[in-house]
Image (cartoon, rainbow, N blue to C red):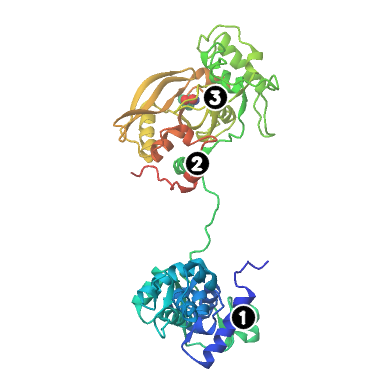
Amino acid sequence: MAPPTNTTASSEDLATDILAALDKSQPLLSSDAFPSATFVDLKAALDRLASREMVRYDTIERQEALLEPEAEQIVANGSHEARVFEALRKAVEGLSVKELEEAIGDKNVVKIGQGKAFKEKWISKTKDGKFTAVADKINDTTQEQIKTVQQTKTHPDPKILADLKKRKLIRTQNIFSFKIHKGPKFALKIPEEATDLTADMIASGAWKTATFKPYNFKALGATQNGGALHPLNKVRQELRNIFFEMGFEEMPTDKFVESGFWNFDALFVPQQHPARDLQDTFYISDPKAADFPRADSPDDTKDYQAYWGNVKAVHQDGKYGSIGYRYPWSGDESLRLVLRTHTTAISANMLHKLAATKGPDGRPLPARYFSIDRVFRNETVDATHLAEFHQVEGVIADYGLTLGGLMEFMEIFFGKMGLHDLQFKPAYNPYTEPSMEIFAYHKGLGKLVEIGNSGMFRAEMLESMGLPKDMRVFGWGLSLERPTMIKYGISNIRELLGHKVDLEFVQGSPAVLLGQE
Ligand code: PHE
């Protein structure tokens, strides 16, 4: 479909008319040549011609004087004073006010006219109070002045013009017209302009004679309302790049619902742990329970039955040198469905699969995994907490890993995000030992802020999966929201996530470069 244009048929004709008129005489004054054309139509037609260099034009602004209805009356019948004089000249005996009003038929004309006629000394009063004409002949200058204005739309004497305006006999208005000259490419017809050079034109040779529409390099084009990445997605992409350049593989996190088994039990979180309370975790009521853990692809050869047994044993009775928690472990509790409270559920699943890999020495391969995805916690919503957030998680599995080496790794990883001089504080996680909270100095806030949680995964967790004793696995997690809020200077999380987010904020937020001030 052709795009809508505002060039109407009439402005098309007008353009041709202008060219024809200009051919006969130039310069052409639009107000003379096209008195009834509107300013808008004229300008559209002229711009069309001017863009093709067929004409050039100047805009002229001038003032035009127009008659008010009272002045029209004066042109037809004479001024008020002249009419009073004329009536009295005919009545030899003179006339009373009443008789004068009857003769003229307009009280207003009499009222104004007799005053003026007195001033002009055209009339006087008789002894018995009647009006009578005293001049022989008068000159109706007011009528003459107005006639001049009527014919020329102005008056040569600006004082008279101002006076007529003050008497509300005329009004003035600004008139724009155009003074039009022929342009270098003047012709009687608007040539067809080609906007594109086509294969057909080349084949037929038509390009040789074609007139091409010049490019308008100043055209801004229509605003493009394309999609925009949410700031969280921009920071997420930056973080993904950091992980990728450090050799990490992205974990498949495409499920929000997990069984308690993967979210808690596999991670050696005891079934009485407060994190498993309703106040902290969202449980799914329908369906009631998860399926028993099983392989999700044909090449997954792991024995899930054995794994389940190991997890139960390590919780209930102790195993792998651990005395366990010593409580009756419930399989039903383990199969309750939850909205995952951390992506560590995915890490557990991945590490369990890793245990089945075999390197050249027959042992599981070292691995680096990461994920960035949504997790859910039953929190009281306030300015800095929602019931969901995005967790950034990294896991490194290798032989002979040491805590010191991993603190070094954290310096490098967070350094790429622009966070330096980390501080580590001993912490507690059911699934890591030792555990460390990671702090960084926040320049804006002028203090240390917690940026992540980390630790060495426990033997109870790793050996249940079948990972060898000397394989160490380090993990850490942080929220995507925190660095994003710091980077974009947002203090209320609801401005970042949820139904109150301003789309202009999303569209207008620049890209980020983590690690850059
Ligand atoms: N799951 C932890 C959290 O929710 C993050 C973490 C991951 C900690 C891996 C240690 C190891 O904060």
Q: Residues within 10 Å of mark 2 (few under 14, many from 20)?
A: some
Comes first in the chain, label 1 or label 3: 1
Where disc 1 sits, the SS reads helix
The picture quadrant where one finds residue 302 is top right
Check mark 2 vs ligand 1: CB closer than 8 Å? yes or no: no
The picture quadrant where one finds residue 308 is top right
Q: Nearer the viewer, mark 2 or mark 1?
A: 1
- Where 66 sits versus 358, above or below? below
The picture quadrant where one finds residue 296 is top right
Comes first in the chain, label 2 or label 1: 1
Q: Where is residue 264 in the image (x, y as percent from the top left)?
A: 56, 19
Check mark 3 vs ligand 1: CB closer than 8 Å? yes or no: yes
Q: Circle 2 sits on which residue?
A: 502
Q: How crowded is mark 3: few (under 14 residues within 10 Å), some or many (20 or more)?
A: many
Q: Is residue 68 visible?
A: no
> CA–CA distance between discs 2 and 3?
27 Å
Relative depth, front residue between 344 and 40: 40
Position of 162 with respect to 397 (left or right) is: left
> CA–CA distance between discs 2 and 1?
49 Å
Identify the amino acid type marked 2.
Answer: Asp
- Where 399 sits versus 124, above or below? above
Identify the amino acid type marked 3.
Answer: Thr
Q: Circle 1 sits on which residue?
A: 13
Comes first in the chain, label 2 or label 3: 3
Q: Circle 3 sits on which residue?
A: 341
Residue that sits furthest to the front in the current view = 128
Where disc 3 sits, the SS reads loop
Please state, as top left, top right, bottom left or bottom right, where the N terminus lies in the image: bottom right
